[in-house]
Image (cartoon, grey):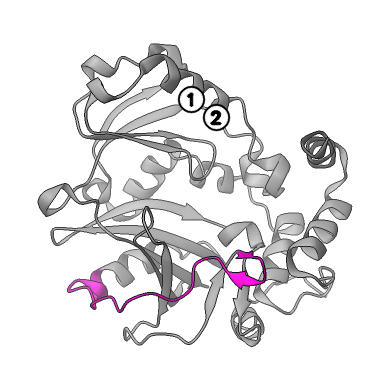
Amino acid sequence: MRQWIEYMAAHYVPTRLYLPLVYRWRFGRWGNLRRPATLNEKLHWKKMHGYEPFHTVVCDKYAVRDWVAARIGERYLIPLVAVLDDAERLDLARLPQPCIIKTTHASGQNIIIRDECQVEEKELKARLRGWMSHNEYYLSREPQYKDVKPRLIVEQLLTEAHGNIPMDFKLHCFHGTVEMIQVDIDRFTDHRRNFYDVSWQLLPFTWCFWRRGRPLWPNGRAVARPENLEKMIAVAQALSKEFDYVRVDLYNCDGRVYFGELTLHHGGGWERFDPPSYDLFYGDKLHLRDAR
């Protein structure tokens, strides 16, 4: 019954009602989405009023590659193995290992392949078909996802020494300037999250989903300042020039910087700051031209 209710709400409740209701459920209070002040309120305002046609291009994990190459060059792109319109066309035996399979039209839909012999191909294709039938727009109401063509891309898996996946750095940019850098630590074991400023000083807050009244991903162990931090900041700022707010995800692998993805609404606008004063602090950095 709950799944049916969630499906009906996501697909049939108008956005102007859906967003305030889900905001109330997520944050425990009503947000001011008409005259937004906090960052999360402004991210929701942008869902309703901030869409530009090129946003659909930059959130498509295949189409964005050309967009990025035109601005900073192909050397920052992760090597592409294949792009497919149909999961049935996937042939594991012909894929170089290790690699990673991603859907192009959603967030968090990734499968790492290190050894094809350890993967049940029938189950893998069933999962991919399910993902490809899902439209991210209806749950998050992020307009850029609505018309993205569902496809699969296969990329080379970036690995460091001992086969470890490199840490990714998420640079939050406001009007072309990096204001904070997010680092997710031990994502597949004991997930923690730190935020740093551009001088690599730990920032005193969390910004994540909550469960049972507590942050789901609290601060973790200290992360050493990347040697090429300035390079990552320069890349992020070059890619963020056309946005009032965007999160630029980069990988730092063996001294090289690789582009990951662009995110227009971090966490869909549903993640809480603790302490909440930082929601207002960063909201002041995002200037919306038409919000009144």
Above-or-below relation of 90 to 53: above
- Of the pair 154 and 223, the residue shown nearer to us: 223
Under circle 1, the secondary element is: helix
Above-or-below relation of 243 to 137: below
Q: Distance between the residues labelled 1 and 2?
A: 5 Å
Answer whether labels 1 and 2 touch (C-beta < 8 Å): yes
* Residue 213 lies in the magenta stretch: yes
Residue at 19% of width from left, 30% of height from top?
97
Q: How many labels were placed on the picture?
A: 2
Q: Where is residue 214 in the image (x, y as percent from the top left)?
A: 61, 72
> Which image quadrant is residue 131 in?
top right
Q: Quadrant of the C terminus?
A: bottom right
- Of the pair 176 and 132, the residue shown nearer to us: 132
Q: Name the residue under label 1.
A: 128
Q: Position of residue 26 (x, y in %)?
A: 74, 63
The residue segment tinted magenta is 210-231
Q: In which quarter of the image is the N terminus?
A: top right
Residue type highlighted by circle 2: Trp
